[in-house]
Amino acid sequence: MKLFLDAGRRVVGLLLLVLVAIPVFLVLDPAAPPSSLDDLMRRSGFEHWSYTWGVTSGVWTLLGIGGAVLVGVLAGGRVSGVLARAAAVIERSPRWAVAGFMGLLGAGLAAAVALIVFDGRTILNDASVQLLQGRYFAAGRLAGPPLAMPEFWSIQFMVHTPAGWVSQYPPAHALWLAAGFRLGGAWIAMAGAVGMLGVFSVLAFERLLPDRIAAVRIGALLAVTSPMLLALAGAYMNHATVAAFAALALWLALRAETGRAVWALAAGGAMGFMVTTRPVSGLLIGAAVTAGVWLTAPRREPGLHRPWLLRRLGWWVLGGLPFAAGLAWFNARFFGGPLTLGYTAAAGPSHGLGFHMDPWGRMYGFTQALGYTSTELMSLGRELLGTVLPVAALIGLFLLFARRLRRGERILVAWALLPILASALYWHHDLVFGPRLLGEAVPAWCALLVLAAIGLTRLGRWAWLRDAIAIVVLVAVGYGLVAGGRARIDRVAARAAPIPEVTDPGPSLVFVHELWGDRVGARLAARGMRLDSVRALLTRYHPCQLEAAFVGAQGPEEVADQCRLESESDRLGWVGLTDYLWHGDPPGLEGSGVLWARDLGPEANARLIAEYPSRTPRFVLPDGRGDGQVVPYDTGLNALWGGVPP
């Protein structure tokens, strides 16, 4: 068995090295239409490959490596000696003091990114929808009430059901955000998540690798300062929440290993929270950092090991059971069955794992899985730490050439690599935050990077080579901490959706003008049409053809005047409604603030205004750059629908 595991990790190491060193992304279709996912991942792959292997920086890369070799030759092993003494100093600090520092540092950085860099704004609709769901939870409701005029608020990833208007996502992350809202803001929840990650990464890693205290403490430091993790947390994404609970679950599992079996009850609960946040990665990572700990534990005396293991597995199952039952009940209430996730209810069976046509009508096959995974692994160093360091390749080399792996290292490898498998089998990929589907494994990647760097330096026969490797890694990581990481966060911040300020007091009804195709899509969704069907119709037909279908016309020519009006209303630009909704009064609930709604034209808007006589109507007037300002309703209506210059 040991021989099989040893061969397996070397094969995995070789695969990582190949996927990063060789431009495997070139298997993607070079003739793919511009802006298609294949085209995006192919171009991004070449960009990251050129950056990672120094092609972009050219001579500076050669000078940097040459300088490191020269210093290594001149130092003659003294650099490694200095690092060993520094490691001894790091190890002497009390465990709980280090854990507390990491927690405070992570929480502070996450709060700063959320409030200062992102200004409390979201980056993706995924987070906006879960924040809206969190607002409903914070108000004491399981969902928004069924909407009387849903076309004004139908948005992607929210599902209209007889039991209410609810997010497609499992509820745990929205509950976490709701706790933040009740405490004063959703940013508190995300700062708490990164703080928790910092504390329990230190505590868990030290128990996992007690002879590598300095290395795992540095790994925890890299995790809480990772620009990818901080951007995910600052943008309210659930990947950061799963990563935090994974660190907690690992610590609890290790306590159960050396202490009483009842610790496994809490470990099962932590894993249950992960699964009810992100089901697939929660199951894979959760099993690796809990059951994986006990299944690989040293064997007890004959006749004692099996009862010891079964007690921990029993408590573990018991701890996760309430979360499984809660998710099943939530699914049955809103989506029709205990095993039917909101993703399927929203977008149909094509949302699932595997190689098939995705909900956008694109084919996702083995070629896409291979090419996309290559691009994402190549981007990992740049996004994880803001540096040129090829993180996945270094870890691959370590797995390939290390004489043996400790049990703790094997568990970290499982935590880091299992999300790659899940991502390869899932059709949804993007690089907004980098390879964000690997975001749940940031602590494991950071710890493995430090362990790999140390392991590779020790493999070197010559002192100058060990010093040169150490210098390259230190300079690269140092650059990321000082400058590169902040640049990656700023890149993400540039995508943040601006929210115009409503300065007038009193309750208001503010109309947001979206693109014509989006308005048509919302009207289709309001009729109960599933998201994959809406996308198929919008891809296949012109909005004017769908306008004709709405009124039962024989063809677009019968609604030509209406189509012209709809098209011309977009001439000043458009903004997205989804990013606005969670900032105001949630639709369907009473409130005295801003109720954001979709602009559907003068006649439709008048019906909604009549439903809210106590609210002052206003408009967000687009500026053509994705931004807008709040103006009186008549001013906005005339500018967009009447052709009167604002």
Image (cartoon, grey):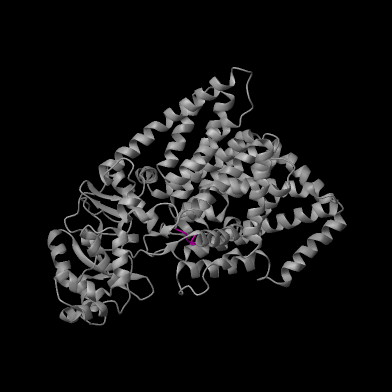
The percent coordinates of residue 516 (x first, y second) are 27, 72
User: In the rendered structure, does residue 161 fall within the stretch colored magenta?
Assistant: no
Q: Residue at x 59, y 69 (%)?
A: 46
Q: Choose between 6 and 439: the one closer to the eye.
A: 6
534 displayed left or right of 277: left
The percent coordinates of residue 221 (x first, y second) are 61, 47
Vertical arrangement, residue 324 with respect to residue 368, above or below: above
Question: Can residue 407 be spotted in the picture?
Answer: yes
Where, by quadrant of the figure, is residue 350 drawn? bottom left
Q: Quadrant of the N terminus?
A: top right
What number of labels is visible? 0
User: In the rendered structure, does residue 431 fall within the stretch colored magenta?
Assistant: yes
The percent coordinates of residue 522 (x first, y second) are 25, 63
Q: Residue at x 52, y 63 (%)?
A: 490
Q: Residue at x 65, y 45 (%)?
A: 9
Vertical arrangement, residue 473 with respect to residue 634, above or below: above
Q: Quadrant of the C terminus?
A: bottom left
Q: Residue at x 48, y 48 (%)?
A: 240
46 displayed left or right of 279: right
Where, by quadrant of the figure, is residue 481 drawn? bottom right
The percent coordinates of residue 169 (x first, y second) are 36, 49
Q: Which residues are magenta?
A: 428-433
